[in-house]
Amino acid sequence: MLHKNLEELRDKALDAVRNARDAMTLENIRVGFLGKKGELTAILKQMGSLSPEERPSIGAFANDVRAAVEGALEKASGTIAEKELIKRLADETVDVTLPGKPFHTGRRHPMQTVLDDVVKIFLGMGFTVAEGPEIETTYYCFDALNTGPDHPARDPQDTFYFDDETILRTQTSSVQIRVMEQAKPPIRIISPGKTYRKDEIDATHSAHFHQIECLAVDKGLTMGDLKGALQTMMEGLYGPDVKLRFRPHHFPYTEPSAEVDLQCFACRGEGCRMCKFEGWIEMLGSGMVHPAVLDRCGIDASVYSGFAFGVGIERLTLMRYKINDLRLLYENDMRFLKQF
Amino acid sequence: MKCSYNWLKEYVRLDGVTPKELAHALTMSGSKVETVTELGADIQNVVIGKVLAIEKHPDADRLFVCSVDVGDGTPRQIVTGADNVFAGAVIPAALDEALLPGGKKIKTGKMRGLESQGMLCSGDELGLDGHDQPDSDADGILILDDSFAVGTDAVEALMLRDTVLEFEITNNRPDCLSVIGLAREAAATLRLPFNGQTDAPRDPLQGEITQVLTVTVENDALCPRYSARVVKDITIGLSPLWMRRRLRACGVRPINNIVDITNYVMLETGQPMHAFDYAYIQDKQIVVRAARAGETLKTLDEKERALEPSMLVIADANNAVALAGVMGGAGSEITEKTRTIVFESANFNGPSVRKTALSLSMRTDSSSRFEKGLDPAMAPAAMERACKLIEELNAGTVLSGTADVQAGPTPPVTVPFTREQIEKHLGVAIPDVNELLESLGFTVKDGAVVVPSWRRDVSIWQDLAEEAARLHGYDNIPATLPPSKNQGWLTEPQKLRAQLHGLCVSLGFYEMLTYSFIGPADLDAARLTADKAKVIQNPLGEEHSIMRTALLPSFIEALSHNAAVRNPEARLYELNMIYTDEGGRLPLETRRLILGGYGGGMDFLALKGVVETLLGRFCRKEAVFARAEEPSLHPGRSASVSIGGRVLGVLGELHPSLGFPPHAAVCELDAEALIELARPDAVFASLPRFPAISRDLALICKKETPAAEIVAIICKAGGALLEDCVLFDVYEGRSIPEDSRSLAYRLTFRAPDRTLRDDEAEAAVAKILKKLQDGLGVIIRS
């Protein structure tokens, strides 16, 4: 009798498992048949009414039934889980061509990026970064740089004055003096910063611009070292193919002095509109520090030599990104700033 | 400085060196060539012709038909509309396929039925005006004299072929503002012979001049040398074709033979010269003196100049007749009637000439040369050249004797040097350094050079190093890397500033760069005053006259630009300098950080969130915000920002009356204080090992109760177990009394050493609620 009940139970359970379509149904079947209050448990509770002879065989059979139902449940749950996963994946599929959710970060100003690059290049060559005031005395900006009271650069038509002896610095070279007054050689500094000249503001001129000054003073520094440092900087900024040209020039605070041209990227020196058909673009002024400048700072020019240069960051930036109007750098238009 | 290639060739043999090659070589040795312009290249197939016969055109009243001999045996029939042509006239004739200036092409064609095999040219059509060629300005064809050979190329015959090199000469080399100076450079650069011998002065000081002129120099510091000579029997006329062409090539307009000679000598030698009409020099006297107070002079440009005692003048016995080194006076100008002249070749003090020219705003070719400091020895040499030209041109009779007044001979400068010194400075071996220096006119002997008088820029061995280097070629100095013993580094503040930049960028802000100077209108817009601001005496304009004492005006300008071009949103920041006058020798330059924007959800709380993150990350401390009033900010939406009691700046929405898009917000902070407060290094805290319990509390409070006060009570009452307290909802409206709002907080409790029990958390919550109710009347929302 019990045996028959077990058989019926087994068939019913297997039938239910066969017809189950989801994980929840399977779980209900498991609880309904095999749980503590399930039908199999209920039948097994009747085992007590059996004779001791019947008990082992019915017991064994009951275990078989349990195993059969458990096996079927397990198998079915695997299949159903797989089906459900497939369905879920299908349901969750998105149109990958939809735009991503917007996420904003800002950017550095292109000029600051160039400046940072230059700083990194010189840090690698053992330089540190020095700073000095933008509102400066005529002594640091001119006299100490061998630029006497009669020099045209001091004219009020070129330099902004606050009073007879206080100006907006026209070049970062003033920092050279402040550094050399304080430090003893070896000196290796660069000094980025704002500079000011009384130029009307247009596509290629600004009354307000930025320079990076470089100064190295040590025993035995040569003009070849100046060339090497500049070559390294330009390669770092524009890649290994840059070609530099050093032309003799005149600055009161260097001797010898050189202007440095960069071969035009657009025409490779052939001459084009970008370089005004010269093939070369004038980039910066440089030279060996004038002994009078060293002496004035208490550095013995017969023992030490040095090189220096000052380069306009605006020009480096315009060249690097092929920007055609300097004023864009100061307009702070989001459409411009987002490009870099 | 424009220079004629043909003229240069007189002083240096440039055989086989093209103008372009010359330009490159000189550029690389320090005389930078800006442009190379070929003259005469725009005229082709124009020859000198002679009109054999001329008759009226049968079918046109105003046309003439000419038969023109162009030297090849085949006369051309050329129709012309000009009425100044006559049989026998020598004229420039453009033949078939000719090219004229401006790209004009001439072809054989028909004019009123008759063939015209070219065109007779006017001066204008050849690019000439009355100063270049007499009668060029007149209507009609350019009639030449019979000395022009028929059949020759007109460009050659009219001496129009030349190449002009335009140089950019540095201030230290006024000697290169001359043909001779550039020729010397060219010769040294290209290792070619230089023929620059100058004429020795003839019969100095004696002679006829003593009877007709005395020269007195009252201030020999401002006039180290003054040479004068007198020329009589002057015939004012045209200077010869070659001279006119060379002047024109160098950008100088030919005037008459005497003026042309002074200009020619200036271009050739670099020495400015002047010619006075002797008839207007009173009492045969030239006095070089300071101008008298109240003295005036009408200069050559017909302007009456008020002089000052700081200015040096050339005067006769009574009046100023020229502004020394700047411009002559109109009264003694050379005219058609001039019969006797005084030539002046003098040396004036550079700075004095510069100041005079500057204060009268009359920079001239002469003044811009003198201001660079010229060689006094050049004065008599130029004088000799001028007198020689007078004789060559048959323009007058030079009286014997020179009035030559000088402060005293300047001894030559000697500079000791060694080759090793120079090579060590440059980093390259220059075995032929002596030869290079000598090619520039230096004399090398006994370990020193004697500097030529025209090289006033050379005084130390480093100057010689430059001379050697530029002739050796800068490009031939090998690039080496300066030996480096250590790596460079950034100082702590420099690193921290870089970090601030990084934070601002990562928070979505774009770096802007603005001018350090602003204008009164910018201050008004930002509702600031110019308190403690440095003001530029000579600004570009009022809008760039004040050194900013805050970044806000610059920020407002940038924001205005973006709003004006209708950018839908803006996020900008800048970390830069402000300038405040604190009474010191120089103003204080300190850094500020400003950030803000509009659009894209920007408002007070959005920016506050940014600033909280920024300060939380940078200073690792919580910032405190308190209601603050700033004239430029929305009074209900602005706050001061402080950390640990130190006020860093303000944060707020821009005042609506400023006209920005709604909720535009800005925060300006003292970056120096930020740097001081920065805590770049974190201190590690152990991760929690026991679970937390969280409780959400919806609290009802009066609207005016600041949330910060509620949080303060929660934190205090929560004690050590309270780990976190986060606001997650603010609600006003239905089911809440009208004067109140609901703030929902999630509190997290945790014990560091054990698993917290629910009842402990409940007890903490109960304590918090009680304190809230007692302190602020806050109740829990049911």
Image: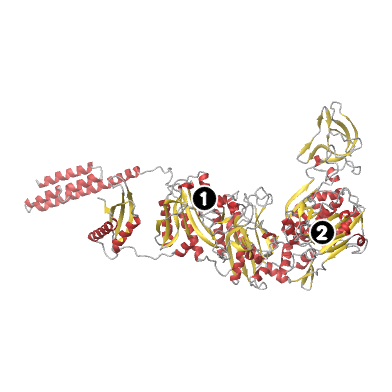
User: Is label 1 on the same chain as label 2?
Assistant: yes
Q: Is residue B669 above or below residue B81?
A: below
Q: Give the image quarter of residue A17.
A: top left
| Residue B403 in sight from this viewpoint | yes
Q: Nearer the viewer, residue B150 or B307?
A: B307
Picture quarter with the N terminus of chain B = bottom right
Location of residue B474 in the rendering, given as x and y in whole percent from the top left corner? 70, 62
Location of residue B60 in the rendering, given as x and y in whole percent from the top left corner? 84, 27
Name which residue lies at 56% across and 55% down. A111
Q: Residue furthest top?
A: B59
How far separated are the C-alphas under marks 1 and 2? 56 Å
Residue type, mark 2 in image: Ile
Horizontal arrangement in the rendering, residue A337 relative to residue B382 (left or right): left
Location of residue B631 in the rendering, given as x and y in whole percent from the top left corner? 47, 52
Mark toward the start of the polypeptide (1 vs 2): 2
Location of residue B168 in the rendering, given as x and y in whole percent from the top left corner? 72, 55
| Residue B14 in sight from this viewpoint | no
Q: List the residue tagged with mark 1.
A: B525
Q: Are marks 1 and 2 in contact (CB under 8 Å)?
A: no
Residue type, mark 1 in image: Ala
Horizontal arrangement in the rendering, residue A180 relative to residue A82 (left or right): right
Q: List the residue tagged with mark 2.
A: B314
Q: Secondary structure at mark 2?
A: strand
What is the chain letter for disc 1?
A: B
Total numbered circles: 2
Horizontal arrangement in the rendering, residue B584 relative to residue B640 (left or right): right
